Each structure stands twice: as structure tokens, then as C-alpha cells.
Image (spheres, helix red, strand yellow):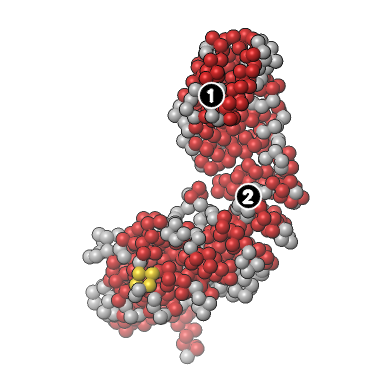
Amino acid sequence: MDTLHHLEEWCFQSTPSVNLLESINSEDHDKCIKSIVYIKNNVIGSNKQKEHIIELGVVPCLLNLLQADNVNEQLKYEIVAIICSLAKGTAAHIKALIDAGVVTILIRAIINSESSHRLLEISLRALRSIFTSSLAPVDVIYETEAYDSPLITFLLNLASSSKSCYVQECIANLLASSCVTADHQIALCNYGAIRTIAGLMLSPAYKVKLPAMELLANICYQNKTVSKVAISTTLAGRSIPQILIDLMGQDQTPIMQLTAARCMTYLCRAEAIESDDNMIRYKTLPTLARMCKKDKDPQTRASAANALAYLTEVDTELQKIASILDHIIPTLADFFNCQPDQSINYSIRAFTPGDGPSLGESPVKNYKDRLPVAQEMREAAFKAFASLAANEEDIRKRIIDTKGLMDHIVKGLSDSNTRVQKAALRCLHSLSRSVQQLRTTFQDHAVWIPLKNLLNNASDDVMIVVSSTLCNLLLEFSPSKEHFLDRAAVETLCSFTQRDEPALRLNGVWALMNMAFQAEQGIKLQILSYLGTTQIFRLLSDPDTNIVLKTLGLIRNLLSTKLHIDHIMVSYGKQLMSAVSMVLDEDHEIGIKEQALCILANIASGTSAKELIMKDEQILKKLIHYMMHENVKLQIAAVFCISNLVWADEEDAAKRQEKLIELGVKRNLEELLHSDDMTLFDKVKTALDQFSHK
């Protein structure tokens, strides 16, 4: 028997492709099915044999045979079994199947095989295997014209009516893998997928409940409309959140508890459930913290930490609660010491939510790109720490004080994997919001070294987080600031302001604004030289109002200190005055106009620079207009500028006062003495006192 097997294997490897193809296409049924069964047995578990079969051109022959009218059910089953095996191979194997048109053929086989349970199951298995790949043509699932009725309707009805747990499991897996955009989420919801999911979650079969929740997670992730439908859906008198809470019970497996908690996390972040709901605070959050503990397998811990990070990312109260649950900070710190057994194939697929809309990621991220488990754990821990440290100084201190953590963060900034690197950056960014840590820990660990390296060589999504962190490191009280006050850093930050990505433009100008604060004149001149006034005008016309506001803040910081103001205005005065005038003329929000007026106040505090304002009739008219504006903030800023212009101790103050009296400024100031706003009153009185010194 062994001799025969080896002989047949030798024939399989050495027989010319034409003979093999002839056997498959033979009119002799026995010869045909023996060839197909033998192919099936050889390709199972062997990528080399799969490659060989595909190169021989066997796949098109199999598909032709599968679609033939005179082929019996047994032969069809064996053919689809081969396809199923090939689909478990490499990405190249899956691509070859897709290019051959196997997806459409399998869908037709599924639709037409209701009478044959075996063929239905094997076809679903094959299709499911193909759709685990990012190469899968997911939109085919949502096509309505290619079949007698919408395929989704067929699959959902089949999942609801079938008594086969395997069929239900495959359909849930298939639809979860096919739900990768917001349009897909809405389509599934509109076809009634939520009610079907609820039914599957109530199944007594473990292997049905789990993929049903995976589908629920994908369909609800970052989708308010679908999530609201989900929480309002009831079946057998129970709502979906109630079902999920039951599945988080400690009598369930860790995977089941974790998946249910993830679903509740996505419903909460989609604003379908309030973050202060007891189901979130006292059930979901503790479950995620419990799943991070050492007694769980590494993949479960990584997935739980990712979900914990996502749940707490934007909610200060949840951050406070989570930080004291189950010793979560030392538990997460232990992630960096964990060395998973690489010989174990951990079965949980960690769903890693995107970093936010600014990264431009699709609403749903499937399980296509996996990291080694040790790297997934580091990434998840960094993300969790980043979320926990986002707002509270006490939490930041406890994280920073965790032994060895800063060393892991600094090491993570140079990680070979971009995802781990970006997560470490996010963690550093959250911690950099602490004034105390900027002054001490960040200086002790020289975090500026890896950050400066990343400034010269990083992808856009990494650079966004790097530049966000730099905005904090460049604050005046940060000792790290001095390490970035060089020509190369200035040039790089100026280049960010010209990028297409709004977040990079914002961070670039924000970092420059912080860099310019109380900086030496040389640094200010470098910024103006590399940035250029043309780019300043572009930034002031940016559709993002935050960029406009930070650009005005940059100009304001550049124009501080009398000597600097006078020197800069000699070279750039005309352009900067035009820029401020443009902002005051346009329809901007109050905060932006206030900043523009504050820039004029800074210019007016210069010795020679103030004459540029006095010679500009249009600017003076704008100041008078904003003195009498209905908004008190604009009035205060305008009056402050007037006060600097008429300051009695300055040279030629009498001439300036005389001109402004002619324009009615003093009269306007006297009217403003009746203001109820004490800040405005004080500014007005100070300005009027200067006139009295005349």
C-alpha cells in the first residue's frame, strides 16, 4: 500500500499536465473522480502541491466541470473541497482563485445547493476561506442584479432558518469579513442583519454565538445609525445589550466574555449607550480589565487591552475608573515582559480599532494584518496607557512611576514595526501633557533623540503623532525644547505646513508657534525665512480654522519683545500688516479676529513698528470699528492696541495722540467708560490716562 502511494505521488509530480487535465476531463466518470479525489488528498496541508496544481492550469478545468449540467453531486463536492483547500493557501493562491472567477461560481453553487446540505456547507467553507483575505472582492456580496434575489437576503434567511450550526457559523464569518465600509454596514442593517445576529447570539451553540458577535462588532463599529438600531432590537424579550451582558458572565469562556465586551465597547463609542451607563462602568470595563490579567492567553490580553484603550480613549471618568481596576497599570506593564510561546497558534483574532478619523482608515478593520503576538501585546499596552493618561495628571504619574516603563516607551519609538512605533508615540504624546514629566522624566530619558530621528524618516501617519508630541516638547517650560532649536528642525516643521494632510499642517504651525514663544531673534528670523510670507497667507486662508488660529498665534509670538518687533517689521512689516488686515476683513469667528487684534497690539508696542499702524488709515479705521464692536473681547483687544499707540512715555506720543483724537478715538474711549465689563473698563481707563499726560 505504501509503495502504491509513493508511486502515485511520483506520478502526480511527474505526469505531464496534459495527462492530468485529460484525466479530469475524461468521459470515464470513475477515472475523472479518482483524479479529482487524488488531487484533493494531495493539496491538503501542502502549499507546494497547491502551487503545482495552480501552475498546471487545473483550476479553470475544475470550475468548468463544476458548472457542467451532467456532473453529479459527489463530484461537485470533491471539486469544491479542492477549491476550499486551495483557499487555505497563500495570498497568491487566493488571488489565482479570485482571478479564475471562483467567487461568483461558489455563490451560485450556494444559492443552487439548498437541496444538498453537504455541497452547501463545503461551498460556504470555501467562500469563507477566500474572504479572510484582503484580496477578496467584498462588494460582490452586496450586488443585487447578478442573482434572482439579493445575496445578503438569501444568506440571512439561510442563517435564520438553517438547523446547521456550521452553516450559521460560516455565514456569520463570511458577512463579518465582508463588512469593511460604512456603506456595507448600512446595507447589512437595512437587509435586517441585526435581527438575524440577535437570533444567532441566542443560539445554544458556542461556535455560532462567537462569529455572530464578531459580525455585530463589525457592523456597529463607529456607526451611530446601525448601533442605535442594535440597541433597540429585541428578540425573545431580550435586547442585544442584555444578551451581551449575559455573555460577559464569568461562567462563559474568556473569548466569549471578551467578544461581548468589545461589542458593548463599540456600541458605547458609537454613542448608542452612554458611557455612564452601569452596563459600561460596572460590567464592560471590569470585564476588559479582567481579560488583561496574566492568567489569560497573550492574544486575549492584547485584544482586551486594545478594546480597553478604545473604550476609555475620550472619556475622563472611564479613564479614572479603569486606572484603579484590577491593578491595571502593573498588569499592562507586564505585557512588555511577556514572551509568548511562538509554537502556539493563538486562536483569538484581535480586533484593533483605527487611531481615528485623521488617519483616514476605513470604518471597519478586519482581521487581515496580524503582528507576532509579542508585538501585538506591546502595541496594545502602549495604546491602553495612552488612553488612560490622556487627561488626568495623577494617572500619568502612576504610569510614569511604573518601573522600566519609560525605557520601553523610548525603545518602542524605534521599533521596526510601524504600528508598535505609532502606539509608543501615542503613549508618549499623552504623557507629554504633564508639565512635571516634561521637566523631569522626559529630560532624564532623552526622548528627543528618537523623536529627532523620526522627523527625518517616518510615514505620514507616524509623523502626525510625532509632530503632536513635539508641540508639547516645544513648550517654554520643557527642557527638551532646546534640542529642537536648530535650522534642521525649523525647516522640517515649516515643510509640514505645506503638506496636504490637515493634521500635519496644524501640528507644523502649532509646533512653530510654541518654538517662537520667547525665542531668540535668530530662531524667529529662521522661521520667517523658511516659512515665507506667501505661506503665511496660505495658512491664514486654510479651511481649517484651527490652522488659521495657530498661524495667528505664531505671528503673535514672533512679534514679541520690542527689539524683535522692530527688526522683524523692517523686513516683513508690509506683508504681516496685510495678513492681519485680511483676517479682520474676512468673516471669521470671534477668537480669530481677537488674535489678529492682539497682533496689532504687539506691533503697537514696538518703538518704530507702531508707525506702520499710524500710517495705515485702513487699519486705524478697523481699530476704531472694533473698539465699538458688540463683542467685548474684540473691544478689549482693540483698546489694548490703542493704549500701546498712545503710550505717553514713548517718543512722538503727542503726535499719535493728536491724530487719534482727530479720528474720534478719545471720545469713543470715554463712551466705553460706562461698560459693565471690568477688564474692558480697566483697559479703557489706562488708555485715557495716557491722553491726560499730554
Foreground label between 2 and 1: 1
The residue at 46%/77% (across/down) is 44
Where does label 2 land, which residue?
429
Tell me where residue 508 appears, x and y as whole percent.
59, 38
- Amino acid type of the residue tagged 1 in the rendering: His
Say if residue 42 shows up in the picture: yes
Q: Residue furthest bottom?
A: 1
Crowding near pointer 2: few (<14 within 10 Å), some, many (20+)? many
Tell me where residue 655 appears, x and y as whole percent.
62, 9
Residue 280: mark: none
The residue at 69%/22% (across/down) is 562
Tell me where residue 269 appears, x and y as whole percent.
47, 58
Where does label 1 land, which residue?
674
Q: Residue 183's quadrant in the figure?
A: bottom left
Q: Describe the element under mark 2 as helix, strand or loop.
A: helix
Above-or-below relation of 73 to 662: below
